[in-house]
Each structure stands twice: as structure tokens, then as C-alpha cells.
């Protein structure tokens, strides 16, 4: 394809026009510091994707491919320099250089993508017929010039680096003012505050007559209000006392309907009818669900008396003796207005001992310190002035630093923040922590500013959008790199863990403290990364499409030190930085440069956006899971740079053959409603999406892969595919299984009426030698009849509505590496008597929703079990006492189970104590029959 060469020639010409401005520029542009690395990495990702076997540039000769590889090598070397310089230098000496690197890298990538888009979609026919020899020579010459340019950049960068070694190392700390609320860390055990905790527990459990009592927790942002509330919310005495517990985060930009839905999730089994109800209906449903029950409601982050007035009517006051409503707020007026007299708790700053204890627990765990480290550490802790948020952020910064000079440098920075304005001091400390992040971590953290404030973000969605945006270098294990970045942000106390997997090994959802959120928004503003509210297209001009400039303000608008809140929009778009004042004729360019569109609210504006999608030519992320579609939008087929696509449909869909155009696609998600039978049918051309890593749809039909590609004469498969759900049973043919041979996580959905012949297809699963997680849903007694039919690599297995006999689990018990087994309405019958020694490596067992009554186990069953979770097993008589001999057992969790199971768990707990072992932790929630005298819980 000759057009490919011209694309690169034009690109190199553009690069040459921009070269060396970085060296000669005198004006410092701080808005793009730290973004150079992200832009270079993104450019690398684009070049790498063009060199893959299924790119639109398959006709390159070996020599030409080598030239592209050389270009990639040069850009890679630039990336290494920028990243290493960013790690070791915080003086700002490289600001002008970074500005130009960022702008040049962005311009090169933009040109490559735009010209290639025009070529692939046939929008620019004129570039097809250019002489191959002429193009090759010009391109070769351009590459040579580029190599000289990069060599020159290296010489200049060495001068900058040498100069940096001669100056003192100081931190660039930006002045971020603070604003809103939320959590210190929901998963951390609280350090200190014992007196306040005991006082609050007493207020919550003491018997008072009359209507429910309202207890406010008052204090500034970051002082630990939410952490304290979480600590008592999950305390054993609270679990025992209240029939119903529910938690909702309100926040400054609150959505009353979402708050009501959040509370209802803990009080009723919600269906789609409830989710689509209006506010008045939801409030009525909530009130009815709480009547004649002793309830504990937590409303986290109430900002105004008006908000409280809007919520208080939802909670019944008659026949609810002993109920409590716990509020957290920064506003003393709210506390006085809403709280029951004499029950308000004012959060104070930590004293020096508490501050040092918190600092040690976060930065050092149980590690011993030398006298010098302890002296400097106490100085740092004292300079945080008793505010827990600043203590944990600074300690997170020092967690992996074990040089005394690093500690002294941070101590000097923190000391310089001494000011009478506590909010300002906290914001500066957060800025210090941000400045010490590497470039890739800064970029990943700023991405949290795209999501609504206080939102709990699914980790898989977050990491896959990181991958799609090009934040991570293209390597074999992108997911592993994303997990590593997230964990480092968590370790630095910049990201909060909301939920973990049942076995505690994976983070499922996360969020950021609202002070961190404000930091992200401010940095997005400083770097001119625009976030649009509503995307409104003006069709008044038949030849051009314009973004309404009135909608271009961010959802948080920064004016000086003040943050003005704008109404949440329907869609948001993350745009590439624009380094000049916006003008009217920039509108169409902004459309093209848009990288991401996210949808967070269910509004009827999808069709307006759908018609304009074709104009977002370089879109990488399209998240429309809140927009219901009735057919596949053909406009999406023109978005050839799309890497992440998420849709919501209520009916079955046929995916068109042109889906093969989306050759960059990594993640493809189609969500449906649980009560709808949605089938997605893929064409044979889907196998051309060889970059695909995650495929998630309600149920889909996947045809056998073609033996040879029609246009390229090569074998097609999903060699990069990591996760699949939910594949139809009939698609588990030998050809399909070989095509997905590297998959690590697979979910298979049956229809409930498959034949015995269909079940034989499951024997092909043994070929999946990388498979670690497997789920079967809606199978009726059709699972493999032998343990040898399962891959030996399998670590996690879930059976849901499979209607197997309990004796079938003797087969599952033989799986050699199984660590997690989840049984959800999986087996029929009343007795489970294991007949074989098995489950030798099982660490977690979940049993949920069945008619099991009698369960026996022997000493050699479940020898290394750590967690036993039983849910909605209302007929089970007891838990086998043999679990008392399982020394590894750490937790028994019971939910919606009869009181006798609590007694059974307590016997196991006591026997372990009698044997001198560490007793198992027993947690009971939402007990069936609500009989309080049967609650047993180890604090």
C-alpha cells in the first residue's frame, strides 16, 4: 500500500518543521510538564500497532519494515531518556524540552493516524497512486533525517542532564487548594481514635426511647470521619444489633436517586423495575423496607441542611426503636441542624503519639528503624499537624525509600508547608506526593478526574481504559503492568480500595479521596486536557460539524483558587492537549482530536451522539454502557483506532462483517439486562481482530475461524485474548478452542436444554493450557464427566445453576491446582458426603442458594482451606465440626443463613481455641429469621 509511505513522509516532514524548537524555546510552558512521557509512549504504541500482522499496512517489504522498526527504536530511546530524567529530576530544568517533545510526539501520532484513517476508509483516493520508488526514496531520506534529529536531541539532553547534576535537588510543589470529602482508606484498620470509637459505639448501641437518633461525625476533609464511620459500621457489636445496615455516599454534587438506590441495595433484592423507578417511588420503597426494623443508616458526606431535609423523610420513625442514622459532614451547621442533642461527635486532630503510630504503620509496617530514621520520621509526622490524610500520603511517599537523605529531603519540604491554613497545607502535601510520582503513574492518576466525583470505579474498566489510551507501554502483559501501576498508587495512599475479590487477592473497585480528585482536576486544567460536559453537534453547516463551545467548559471550572461546580453532563470526552487559545474554527479539529467519550448517565441523548460519531476519527475509548441501543451502530465501524468499546443492548444483535475494520480493538463489551435473553452473533471476520484481549457479552455465537484469511493468506486467531464471557456452549468446538488457546479466564453460558452431544464439546477445554478461571452458568447436568477434561492449570471454578448432584463434586475435588470454588445454585439434593480425599489446594469455598441440609466432611477434605463462605443456605443444619482441625482456616462468613449455622460456627471457633490454635474469624450478616440471641461474632 503506497499510501502508507506518504503518511510517514508527511509525518516526518511535520517533525522536521518542529525540530529543535525544544532546544531554543525560551518561554516556559508549565502546562505540559510531565506529559511528554505519556505522549511518547502513546506514539510508540501507535507505531507498534502498525507493525502487527493485522494492521492496514501488511504489504511492507522486509526492508521497509526494518525502517519502521528503526523509527520505533529511536522513539523508544527518547522514551527511556524522558522517563529516567523525570524520575531523577524535579527542578523543572527540562520544561521547554518536555513541551516540545510532547507537542512533536502528539503531532506525529495525530498525522499518522489521521492520514491512515483517510486511506483505509477511502476518503483520500489521491494518495494511492504515487510512485512506489519515489515514495520509498523520500521516506528513506526522511528517516535518515529523523535519526540525525534524535541524535542531536540526545546531545542536548546530555547537557541538560549534566546541568541538573550541578544544582540542588528540590521538589516542585504546586499550590492546590482543597475542596471536598470522603474516605481515608476503607480497608485500613484505624490507628488511634480508640476513645472516639468507643464513644461512638456506645451511642449507637445504647437503648433510647422514641424515634431514631441521628449522630453526626463532624470534622474537616481528610481528618478521618469516613474511616471512623466504616470502622464502627463493620464492628461486631453493630452487626449483631441491627436488622438492616445501609451506607450511601452523598457528596457535594449529590444525585438523590443514586443515593436512594445505594441504600436500597442493602435493604431489598433489587430488580430492574426498582432501578427505573422515580425518586418518589424509591423513597417510598426505602421507607417500607425499613418499617418495623432496627436499622442503621450511614449518610457519608452531607454538605447542607437542605440535602438532609430531602433525605430524612425517607426513614420511618414509628416502630423503629433503637434505630440510628449516622452522618459525616464538614459543616457544623448541618450537625447542629440534623443531630440529636448531645450525640454529635467532633473529630479532633491526632496528637503526636497517634500521628507517629499512624506514620509507622503506613510507612514501615513492623520494620525496625535506626535512631536517625526515627528522629526524622517523627519530625515529618509532627509537621503533618495531626491530619490523618497528610500523614498517610507522606508515609506512602516514603514507603519504598530507605535512604536517610530522601527522608530528610521530604522533611524539609513538609516543614516548608507550615501555614495557618490547614486546607492549604493539606493540598500542598498532596501536591508533593503527586510530584514524586513517575510520569506513567501521574498519567494514570489524572485519569481518575474523568469519572464523576466520589464514584466507585470498577478496576477492570479503569485498567482497560488505561491500556486503550496508551498510558502503558505495549508489552505481553499489559494487564500485569496496569495492576502494578494501580497497586503502587494504592500503596502511596493516593487511591482507595473499595472492594476486593472474595479471596482478597485482587482489587475489584476503587476511588480517590475528593482532595486527590480536586488535585487531578486542577492538573487536567493546567495541562489543557479539556473535559466536555455534553457533546452537542451543530449541523447548521452541511459541510462541517461543530462542537458547541458553550459546552466546552469542564465539569469543574477553576478560577484562581476557587472551584465552581458545573452540572454533570451526559457524556464526557478526554481531549488531547491544545496549547493555544481556542478559536471558533478549532471546533472541527477538536472533534478529530477527541480520544475518549464516556457516558455516565441514562439520558435520551444517545441518538444525537450516534449520528456524529463518524467525526471523532481518532477515538480510542467509547464507553456507552448507559445508552441502550437496538442495533449495532454502523458509525462505529469508521473508528479504526478504537481500542475500547462498551455498549448496552436489550435485544439480540448481529455484528456486521465490517467489524474487522476495528483492527486496534482490545476490549469489546456488550452488556444486557439479567432478565433478557440476549444473543450476540459474530461474523467470521471477527477473527481478524487479533489485538482483542477482552471480550464480554451476555451470550454470543462465535463461528469457527477461517483456515486462511482471504486477503492475507494467513491463519487468524485470538492469540492475545485474555478473558471471554459468555461463550455459548455450542461454540466450544475444537477449532474455536484452538483459536482462543491463550485465554486465561473463560465463562460459558448454556441455554438449559443442550443435548448430550453438546456436552461432549466441553472435553475440548483441556486444550486451554493457559486457563486459570472457568465459569459455567445455566447448564443442566452436562458438565465434563472426568477431571481429566479440565485443564490442569485451572485455579478458580464457578458453577452457577448447573443442577449437578452433590456427588459430582468428587470429580471437581480431583483438580490438582484448584484454589477457589464457587457453587451458586449449583447442586441439587439434600446431602453432600464427599467420598474421596480432595480439594488439596482449595483456599476458598463459597456455597450459595441451594437445598443442602446435611454436610459431612473428613479430616482429609479441604486440608488448606482459608475462607468458608455460606450464603442463603436456609436448610443447612450445621457446618462440619471437622473444620476445627483445619489449621489454615481464617474466616467463616455467613449471610442470610439460619441462626443454627451461627451456633455451629461458634463451636468450631471454640474448639480451635481449646486446641490452642488461632480461632477462626466468624462474620454473620443479614441472618435469616433475625433472631438476635443467635448472633455470634469474634471481634
Image: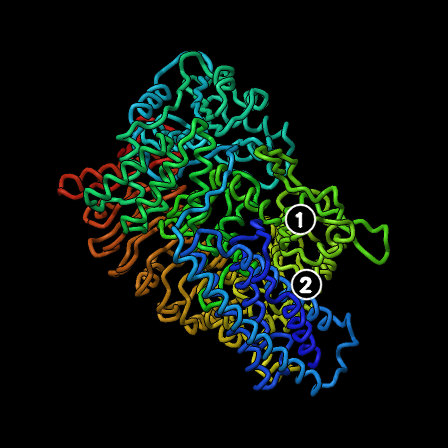
Left or right of 906 in this view: 173: right
Examine the rendered structure and indicate whether residue 558 appears above or below residue 308: below
What residue lies at 43% left-to-right and 71% top-to-bottom? Answer: 768
How many marks do you count on the picture?
A: 2
**Residue 773, image x, y percentages:** 42, 61
610 left or right of 560? Answer: right
**Residue 25 horizontal/vertical position (percent):** 59, 58
Residue nearer the viewer, 566 or 842: 566
In this figure, which residue is indicated by the disc labeled 1?
Answer: 627
Query: Residue 685's spot in the image, x, y percent?
Result: 64, 73
Describe the element under mark 2 as helix, strand or loop.
Answer: loop
In the depicted structure, whether residue 469 falls above or below residue 304: below
Circle 1 sits in a helix, a strand or a loop, which is it? strand
Q: In which quarter of the image is residue 799?
A: bottom left
Query: CA–CA distance between discs 1 and 2?
Result: 18 Å
Identify the image quadrant of the C terminus: top left
Q: Do the residues labelled 1 and 2 touch (CB within 8 Å)?
A: no
Amino acid at each position: 500500500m503506497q499510501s502508507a509511505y506518504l503518511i510517514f513522509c508527511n509525518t516526518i516532514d511535520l517533525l522536521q518543521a518542529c525540530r529543535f524548537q525544544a532546544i531554543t524555546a525560551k518561554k516556559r510552558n508549565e502546562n505540559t510538564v510531565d506529559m511528554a512521557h505519556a505522549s511518547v509512549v502513546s506514539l510508540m504504541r501507535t507505531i507498534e500497532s502498525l507493525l502487527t500482522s493485522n494492521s492496514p499496512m501488511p504489504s511492507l517489504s522486509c526492508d521497509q519494515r526494518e525502517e519502521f522498526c528503526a523509527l520505533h527504536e529511536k522513539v523508544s530511546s527518547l522514551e527511556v531518556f524522558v522517563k529516567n530524567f523525570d524520575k531523577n529530576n524535579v527542578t523543572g530544568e527540562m520544561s521547554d524540552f518536555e513541551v516540545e517533545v510532547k507537542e512533536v510526539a502528539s503531532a506525529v501520532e495525530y498525522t499518522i493516524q489521521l492520514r491512515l484513517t483517510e486511506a483505509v476508509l477511502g476518503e483520500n483516493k489521491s494518495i494511492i497512486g504515487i510512485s512506489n520508488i519515489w515514495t520509498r526514496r523520500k521516506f528513506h531520506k526522511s528517516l535518515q533525517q529523523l535519526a540525525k534529529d534524535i541524535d542531536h536531541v540526545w546531545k542536548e539532553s546530555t547537557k541538560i542532564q549534566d546541568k541538573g547534576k550541578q544544582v540542588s535537588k528540590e521538589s516542585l510543589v504546586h499550590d492546590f487548594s482543597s475542596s471536598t470529602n470522603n474516605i481515608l482508606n476503607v480497608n485500613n484498620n484505624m490507628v488511634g481514635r480508640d476513645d472516639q470509637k468507643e464513644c461512638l459505639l456506645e451511642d449507637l448501641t445504647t437503648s433510647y426511647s422514641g424515634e431514631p437518633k441521628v449522630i453526626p461525625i463532624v470534622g474537616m476533609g481528610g481528618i478521618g470521619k469516613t474511616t471512623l464511620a466504616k470502622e464502627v459500621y463493620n464492628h461486631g457489636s453493630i452487626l449483631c444489633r441491627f436488622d438492616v445496615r445501609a451506607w450511601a455516599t452523598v457528596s457535594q454534587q449529590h444525585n438523590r436517586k443514586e443515593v436512594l438506590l445505594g441504600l436500597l441495595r442493602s435493604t431489598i433484592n433489587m430488580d430492574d423495575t426498582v432501578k427505573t423507578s422515580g425518586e418518589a417511588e424509591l423513597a417510598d420503597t426505602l421507607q417500607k423496607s425499613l418499617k418495623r426494623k432496627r436499622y442503621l443508616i450511614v449518610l457519608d458526606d452531607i454538605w447542607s441542611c437542605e440535602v438532609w431535609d430531602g433525605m430524612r423523610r425517607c426513614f420511618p420513625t414509628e416502630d423503629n426503636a433503637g434505630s440510628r442514622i449516622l452522618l459525616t459532614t464538614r459543616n457544623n451547621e448541618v450537625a447542629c441542624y440534623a443531630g440529636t442533642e448531645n450525640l454529635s461527635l467532633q473529630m479532633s486532630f491526632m496528637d503526636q503519639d497517634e500521628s507517629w503510630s499512624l506514620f509507622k504503620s503506613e510507612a514501615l509496617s513492623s520494620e525496625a528503624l535506626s535512631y536517625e530514621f526515627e528522629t526524622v520520621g517523627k519530625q515529618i509526622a509532627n509537621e503533618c499537624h495531626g491530619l490523618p490524610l497528610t500523614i498517610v500520603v507522606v508515609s506512602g511517599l516514603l514507603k519504598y525509600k530507605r535512604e536517610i537523605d530522601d527522608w530528610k529531603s521530604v522533611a524539609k519540604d513538609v516543614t516548608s508547608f507550615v501555614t495557618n491554613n490547614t486546607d492549604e497545607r493539606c493540598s500542598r502535601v498532596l501536591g508533593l506526593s503527586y510530584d514524586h510520582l513517575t510520569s506513567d503513574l501521574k498519567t494514570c492518576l489524572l485519569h481518575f478526574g474523568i469519572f464523576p466525583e466520589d464514584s466507585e470505579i470498577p478496576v477492570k474498566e479503569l485498567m482497560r481504559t488505561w491500556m486503550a489510551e496508551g498510558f502503558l507501554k505495549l508489552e505481553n502483559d499489559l494487564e500485569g503492568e496496569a495492576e502494578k501501576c494501580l497497586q503502587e498508587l494504592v500503596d502511596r495512599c493516593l487511591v482507595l480500595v473499595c472492594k476486593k475479590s472474595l479471596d482478597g487477592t485482587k482489587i475489584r473497585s476503587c476511588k480517590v479521596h475528593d482532595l486527590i480528585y480536586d488535585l487531578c482536576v486542577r492538573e487536567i486544567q493546567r495541562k489543557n486536557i479539556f473535559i466536555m460536559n455534553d457533546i452537542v453537534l451543530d449541523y447548521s453547516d452541511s459541510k462541517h460539524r461543530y462542537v458547541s463551545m458553550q459546552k466546552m467548559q469542564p465539569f469543574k471550572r477553576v478560577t484562581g483558587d476557587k472551584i465552581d461546580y458545573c452540572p454533570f453532563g451526559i457524556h464526557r470526552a478526554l481531549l488531547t492537549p491544545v496549547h493555544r487559545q481556542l478559536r471558533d474554527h478549532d471546533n472541527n479539529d477538536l472533534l478529530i482530536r477527541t480520544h475518549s467519550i464516556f457516558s455516565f448517565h441514562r439520558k435520551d441523548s444517545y441518538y444525537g451522539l450516534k449520528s456524529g460519531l463518524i467525526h471523532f476519527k481518532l477515538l480510542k475509548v467509547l464507553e456507552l454502557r448507559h445508552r441502550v441501543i437496538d442495533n449495532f451502530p454502523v458509525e462505529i465501524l469508521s473508528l479504526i483506532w478504537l481500542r475500547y468499546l462498551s455498549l448496552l443492548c436489550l435485544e439480540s444483535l448481529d455484528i456486521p462483517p465490517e467489524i474487522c475494520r476495528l483492527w486496534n480493538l482490545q476490549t469489546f463489551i456488550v452488556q444486557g439486562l439479567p432478565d433478557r435473553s440476549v444473543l450476540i452473533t459474530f461474523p467470521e471476520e471477527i477473527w481478524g481482530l487479533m489485538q482483542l484481549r477482552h471480550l464480554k457479552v451476555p451470550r454470543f455465537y462465535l463461528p469457527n475461524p477461517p483456515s486462511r484469511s482471504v486477503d492475507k493468506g494467513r491463519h487468524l486467531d485470538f492469540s492475545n485474548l485474555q478473558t471471554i464471557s459468555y461463550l455459548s456452549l455450542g461454540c466450544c468446538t475444537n477449532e474455536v478452542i484452538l483459536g482462543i488457546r491463550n485465554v486465561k479466564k473463560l465463562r460459558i453460558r448454556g441455554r438449559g436444554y443442550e443435548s448430550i452431544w453438546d456436552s461432549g464439546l466441553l472435553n475440548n477445554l483441556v486444550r486451554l493450557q493457559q486457563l486459570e478461571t472457568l465459569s459455567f452458568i445455566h447448564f443442566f447436568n452436562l458438565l465434563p464427566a472426568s477431571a481429566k477434561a479440565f485443564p490442569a492449570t485451572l485455579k478458580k471454578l464457578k458453577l452457577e445453576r448447573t443442577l449437578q448432584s452433590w456427588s459430582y463434586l468428587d470429580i471437581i475435588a480431583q483438580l490438582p491446582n484448584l484454589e477457589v470454588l464457587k457453587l451458586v445454585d449449583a447442586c441439587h439434593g439434600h446431602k453432600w458426603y464427599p467420598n474421596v480425599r480432595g480439594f488439596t489446594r482449595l483456599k476458598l469455598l463459597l456455597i450459595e442458594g441451594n437445598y443442602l441440609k446435611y454436610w459431612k466432611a473428613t479430616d482429609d477434605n479441604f486440608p488448606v482451606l482459608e475462607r468458608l463462605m455460606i450464603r442463603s443456605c436456609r436448610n443447612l443444619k450445621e457446618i462440619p465440626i471437622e473444620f476445627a482441625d483445619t489449621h489454615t482456616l481464617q474466616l467463616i462468613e455467613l449471610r442470610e443463613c439460619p441462626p443454627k449455622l451461627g451456633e455451629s460456627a461458634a463451636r468450631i471457633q471454640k474448639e480451635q481455641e481449646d486446641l490452642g490454635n488461632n480461632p477462626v474469624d466468624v462474620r454473620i450478616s443479614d441472618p435469616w429469621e433475625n433472631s438476635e440471641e443467635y448472633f455470634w461474632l469474634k471481634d
